[in-house]
Image (cartoon, rainbow, N blue to C red):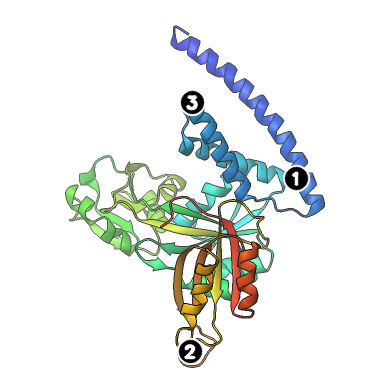
Amino acid sequence: MKTLDDCRVKIDELDDKLLDILNERMKVVERVGEIKHESGGAIYRPEREKAIIERLALKSKNDGGLLNKAAIEAMFLELFAVSRNLELPERIAYLGPEGSFTHQAAESRFGAMSDYMSLSSIYSVFKTLEAKRAKFGVVPIENSRDGIVGETLDLLAKSSVKIVAELYMPIHMSFATKSKELKDIKKIYSKDKGFGQCREFLNEHGLSDAELIPVESTAKAAILASAEPNSAAICSHIAAKLYGVPILFNDVEDNIGSSTRFVILSDFKNAMSENDKTSIFVQLKDAVKAGSLVHFLQDFDDANINMSKIESRPSKDKEGFGYWFFIDFYGHIDEPRVQEIIKKHDGEITWLGSYVKGDNEI
């Protein structure tokens, strides 16, 4: 290939071959969907998807390929989403509005082709799943700076839906505007926290004199900036793209590194994999007895089960001061060593889900 035209001809040839291979893959996927429909198997198998990506990333590395794990994951997650919609189209409910970070997290796992339902509250996501109006739900459960999302935990404790997957997403702010020059910007819209997180950026770029207008969401900020001249938005990347506001700067937050843990909810149990995490709620019968929590945790230590989180929550169904404990540990609910603990503490443990451990934990 000596010329640019030669390269383009070669790329066209490879694209044709790639399309043929993808169509062949989809024929197999279609048959998989038929088998799952007959057997009642789950369409979304995060442990299977993770295993495929890990295998391909290792193959690319060993073969000296140019694609690293992140690139492979970006392409294949979209391919998996297309495949799932071919197997059985599913609706995904998420904490809105459209263009929110939760929407961005949902699209990162279910792709652009899925049927999404934007809802105004975490409570609405749970109720929609319980009523079978959607198959999957996506809600935030924890932020690296603001801590646990209490509403999500409280609803998990009482709901029939379970955690089937988790994902960790860096939270980056974009500065989007239709203005050609920064000096023309008179108003900037964002959620109230957005301004505090981007104070240094605003000062460095001479935007501290612009009117800062807080709105209910970064998606709303993008909507307003798309319609109003001489305005801008501090918002998510997906909101700017969705509402047609050009991004002038990415990652404008003062401190890079904030991330949010999202959970995907549904009504099925994942099969065991080699990299599982389980979430439970614990309400000890003898909670007022000295050392009751220590003795409970000792059972996990004796079984060589590592915990990744323990968080106390007020128990709202008791008079006075009562507490639940939200616990994440490594392992699957069906493992014999875990089942021994469940049996020992019969009536004290509520299982919230077992799922493949997400990358880049908080």
The mark nearer the N terminus, 2 or 3, is: 3
Q: Quadrant of the C terminus?
A: bottom left
Element carrying mark 3: loop
Instruction: Please say if 67 is above or below 42.
Output: above
Disc 2/disc 1 C-alpha distance (Å)? 52 Å
The mark nearer the N terminus, 3 or 1, is: 1
Q: Position of residue 218 (x, y in %)?
A: 39, 57
Q: Position of residue 211 (x, y in %)?
A: 24, 59
Element carrying mark 2: loop
Q: Residue at x 48, y 13 (%)?
A: 7
Q: Position of residue 8 (x, y in %)?
A: 50, 15
The mark nearer the N terminus, 2 or 1, is: 1
Disc 3/disc 1 C-alpha distance (Å)? 32 Å
Instruction: Categorize mark 3 by other alpha carbons within 10 Å: few (<14), some (14-19), many (20+).
Output: few
Q: Are marks 3 and 1 in contact (CB under 8 Å)?
A: no
Q: Residue at x 59, y 43 (%)?
A: 51
The amino acid sitting under disc 1 is Gly
Residue 65 has which mark? 3
- Between residue 303 and residue 33, name the one nearer to us: 303
The amino acid sitting under disc 2 is Lys
Instruction: Categorize mark 1 by other alpha carbons within 10 Å: few (<14), some (14-19), many (20+).
Output: many
Instruction: Categorize mark 2 by other alpha carbons within 10 Å: few (<14), some (14-19), many (20+).
Output: few
Disc 2/disc 3 C-alpha distance (Å)? 59 Å
Q: Which residue is mark 2?
A: 289
Q: Which residue is mark 1?
A: 33
Is residue 26 among what the camera can see? yes
The image quarter containing residue 348 is: bottom right
